Image (tube, helix red, strand yellow):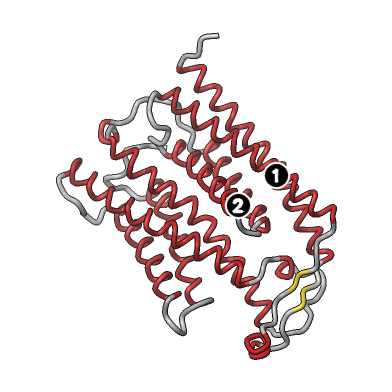
Amino acid sequence: MIFDEQTFAQLSNGLVYSAIAVYALALLAYAAETAGQVAGATTLVADSPARSRLAGATTMVAAPPSRSRRLGAVGTSLTVLAFLLNLGGVITRGLAAGRVPWGNMYEFVLVCALAAGAAYLAFLSRRPVRAFGVWIVAIVLLALGLAVTVLYTPAGDLVPVLDSYWLVIHVAAAITAGGVFTVGAIATGLFLVRHRLERRGTTQAPKGRYPATLPTTRTLEQVAHTAHIFAFPIWTFAVIAGAIWAENSWGRYWGWDPKETWAFITWVCYAAHLHAQATAGWRGVRASWFALAGYAAFLFNFFGVNLWITGLHSYAGV
């Protein structure tokens, strides 16, 4: 069988739809695992912050039922399969277009979903973050659903302004940072949920509370910090590379175009977050809000600016 551009395009579409179907099954498995854990979770916490600091008290979560653990393992296996299908869809899309597969919004969403899945699986191999699974898969599923229903664009050539090696460098860095920022945002959000439970200082949390099933605040904060400290330099490089590309294309490094402005706002929010983490009195909850603001700015930069605001970056279409 001879594979031409049309065949690769059809294969890519089929792989993406298959990834969506498998991600949906993974979401059901993770949701069932979470429901089982909530039904049986009882959490013991220190009865006061002072006692926790002096006695070194730790937070303990009752082991989930074996059925819940099996459902979580199934969810992880399905997530790996869906990730591979997504990867295949991205590769065949690139073969169909004859270029790197991130030349428009549809392709960019496909690759961002891939990066978020890869970041989650990488953290899962080293940290106890399976509680993130239901949220990561939900975000990826929503992104892919939006891609195939609203943003789909047939494979084709790049518009002239994008036909540059800087497309590979700048956009690849932004995609990588965005995938890791997604894990960091979920870890930060769950940290705030878990922190609210532990702050109450009760000796035993009521049964059936979702926060009781989450990893400790220490674990969640460490995961979030690792994600942000890894992604922030990559995002910084993406902003710098974009400025260099802008000089090559438009004759100036920076012009406060909406895309450039929101990329800078994102950078400032994450820089403030990392600075706050190193500043006494701003660690923990206060610092976390900067990280969530940074992720909100990242999402608006990607979706809001591209779809609703006209600027020099409004050339790739959807």
| Residue position for label 1 | 26
Relative horizontal placement of residue 101, taking residue 191 as reference (left or right): left
- Residue displayed at 67% across by 36% down: 21
Could you say which disc has been placed on residue 136 in the image?
2
- Is label 1 in a helix, a strand or a loop? helix
SS of the residue under disc 2: helix
Picture coordinates of residue 83 (x, y %)?
A: 59, 39
**What amino acid does circle 2 point to?**
Ile
Please indicate whether residue 207 sits to the left or right of residue 275 in the image: right
Which sits earlier in the primary sequence, circle 2 or circle 1?
1
**Horizontal and vertical percent for residue 200?**
69, 83
Location of the C terminus by quadrant is top left
Q: State the CA–CA distance, disc 2 to disc 1.
A: 10 Å
**Which of these two is toward me, 241 or 122?**
122
Q: Classify 255 as above or below 19.
A: below
Residue 48 lies in what quarter of the image? bottom right
> Which residue is nearer to you in this view: 168 or 149?
168
Q: Which residue is drawn at 57% across and 50% down?
A: 122
- Give the left or right position of residue 205, taking residue 123 as reference: right
Q: 10 Å neighbourhood of mark 2: few (<14), some, or many (≥20)?
A: many
- Residue at horizontal 21 percent and vertical 54 percent from the top: 254
